[in-house]
Image (tube, helix red, strand yellow):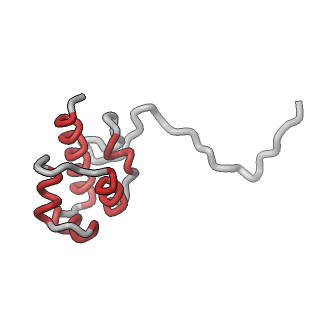
């Protein structure tokens, strides 16, 4: 994947996350301490997006940073989180379960 396509893909996923939360670039800019113009320039590819930017954006939008980076993002066009590998296992502890000795 080219760097330009990667940037476009990340920007698309940021846009999906923003739309699903009903927020604007102005709101996002305020949350991450940048101007709306700078956010727009980063999302349109005129200025690069750093990992620090992505971390700030992910925190502001309350999404895992991996959802913004992954080519198989959990952010889908339907704006609903999906798991491309099927359901994740439930790793929570069940206090009622007792190990059985072999």
Rendered view: 20 above or below 28: above
Q: Where does residue 11 sit, x and y in percent of width and height? A: 21, 47
Task: Please give the count of numbered marks on the rendered protein.
Answer: 0
Image quarter (top left, top right, bottom left or bottom right) of the C terminus:
top right
Most extreme residue toward the right is 101
Question: Residue 60, how many percent across, how many down?
Answer: 32, 63
- Residue at screen point 41% across, 38% down: 83
> Is 59 rendered above or below residue 2?
below
Judge left or right: residue 19 versus residue 46: right
Looking at the image, which residue is at 28% across and 51% down? 50
**Residue 58 % position (x, y):** 34, 56
Quadrant in which the N terminus is drawn: top left
Residue 45's x, y, as percent? 13, 47
Nearer to the camera, 84 or 32: 32
In the image shown, does 79 or 29 lie closer to the viewer?
29
Q: Which of the 4 image quarters holds residue 67?
A: top left
Left or right position of 37 against 32: left
Q: Is residue 39 above or below residue 1?
A: below
- Identity of the residue drawn at 34% across and 34% down: 72
Indicate the quadrant where residue 37 lies. bottom left
Depth check: give the residue in front, 63 or 40: 40
């Amino acid at each position: 994947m080219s760097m330009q396509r990667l940037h476009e893909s990340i920007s698309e996923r940021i846009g999906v996350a923003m739309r699903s939360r009903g927020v604007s670039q102005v709101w996002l800019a305020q949350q991450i301490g940048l101007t709306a113009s700078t956010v727009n320039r980063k999302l349109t590819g005129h200025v690069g997006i750093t990992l620090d930017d992505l971390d700030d954006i992910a925190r502001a939008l309350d999404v895992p940073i991996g959802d913004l980076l992954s080519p198989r993002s959990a952010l889908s066009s339907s704006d609903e989180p999906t798991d491309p590998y099927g359901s994740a296992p439930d790793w929570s502890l069940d206090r009622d379960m007792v190990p059985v000795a072999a």
